[in-house]
Amino acid sequence: MAGMLTMAKKEFLDIIGEKKFMLIFATLLIVILVSAYQGGLSYSESQSATGSFTFESGQGRGRVGNTTGPVMVFGSAQSLSNSLESMITNFSLVGGVLAIAISFDTINNERQRGSLKTLLSYPIYRDSIVYGKYLGGLLAVTMVSVVSFLGGMGLFISVTGIEMTTDTVLRLAMFFGVSLVYMAIFLAIGLLLSIVLPSPSTSLLASMIVWLSSIQLIPNLGYAIGQILYPVRMTFSQTGEPSFTQQTGFTTLRTIISGLSPSTAYENIVNSLLTTSSLEFTSGTPTVTSISVTTALMSSLPSLLYFVGLLIAIFAAAYVVFMRQEIR
């Protein structure tokens, strides 16, 4: 235990002292602040949306009024997920890069310098090394997440003046927790590749390939496979006019395949947790339905379980490989 904590402290201090860490940290913070400010403006504008609209009377005449109508209904249906969409996307992009930058050379860099073999000559267990290095990286990631999240949310709240109810606090707390797990996943990916691959340059390249696959390849692959197996059908009406319909299986298959991507799973979970209301049409009349925290949490539960399971599986793989690996 003492060896693990000592290793974690050393790793944490080494990480925060690197220029690459400070550079990516500053980039993430700036991006989050800008996204939060833009989201705050969007939320404020949507909540104050009013205007005139025309609707048809029974005799076919149009009437104009400044009363509650579709404009205000759509404004009140604006959820936190809509306002913070840019912040969520940017966090999934830059947050993943930061986690990889921290961990891609965790083990193989020390192996190349010979310091890992020297370290193992001391009375310290192997598992203390892998636990300590991951814990040190996780502390650095947590520090980044806390600063970025508090800064972004503080700016968002100051711009919108949103009331901090228990519901809002719970949603934002879950947003932070899921964001931390997301960065921990890429931290574990970098650690695993630094153990498996011999050189830091190779593990960096492999880590970036995994990150790009998560951001672009897997979601696009899900869309492509869905289009192949469930193509758009064209039908003709009695007048000969064509119409195009998408088969129902397309959406299900695309969602399943795309959900395998950590980035897509992260965005799906956070969007679900931050969705506070939905717009429904009853007899042609738009109404806003509130979504409770419990309902939002239950709807994202499958993705949450996959998210946590993926983190455990990747770190377990890194642990097993390192424990069985011969150190020269």
Image (cartoon, rainbow, N blue to C red):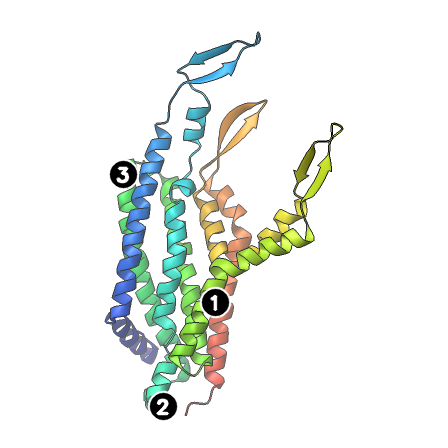
- Number of the label disc, if any, that sits on residue 117: 2
- Number of the label disc, if any, that sits on residue 159: 3
Q: Quadrant of residue 238?
A: top right
Looking at the image, the residue that sits furthest to the top is 59
Number of other residues with Cα within 10 Å of mark 1, as a class: few under 14, some 14 to 19, many 20 or more: some
Q: Label 1, on which residue?
A: 210
Q: Foreground residue, 263 or 212?
A: 212
- Tell me the quarter of the image containing the N terminus: bottom left
Instruction: Check if mark 3's residue and mark 1's residue have beta carbons within 8 Å.
Output: no
Looking at the image, the residue that sits furthest to the right is 238
Identify the residue at image location x=44%, y=32%: 77
**Can residue 7 be seen at all in this image of the molecule?**
yes
The spot of residue 83 in percent (x, y) is: 38, 41
Check the image and report above or below for 127 versus 185.
below
Q: Foreground residue, 261 or 119?
A: 261
The spot of residue 87 in percent (x, y) is: 36, 49
**Of tags 2 and 3, which is closer to the observer?**
3
Three-letter residue code for mark 3: Val
- Number of the label disc, if any, that sits on residue 306: none
Check the image and report above or below for 144 versus 327.
above
Three-letter residue code for mark 1: Val
**Of tags 3 and 1, which is closer to the observer?**
1
Alpha carbon separation for disc pair 2 and 1:
29 Å
- Identify the mark nearer the N-term, 2 or 3: 2
- Tell me the quarter of the image containing the C terminus: bottom left
* Secondary element at image label 2: helix
In the rendered structure, the answer to whether residue 67 lies left or right of residue 230 reads: left
* Secondary element at image label 1: helix
Identify the residue at image location x=47%, y=39%: 292
The spot of residue 108 in percent (x, y) is: 39, 82
In the rendered structure, the answer to whether residue 135 lies left or right of residue 55 reads: left
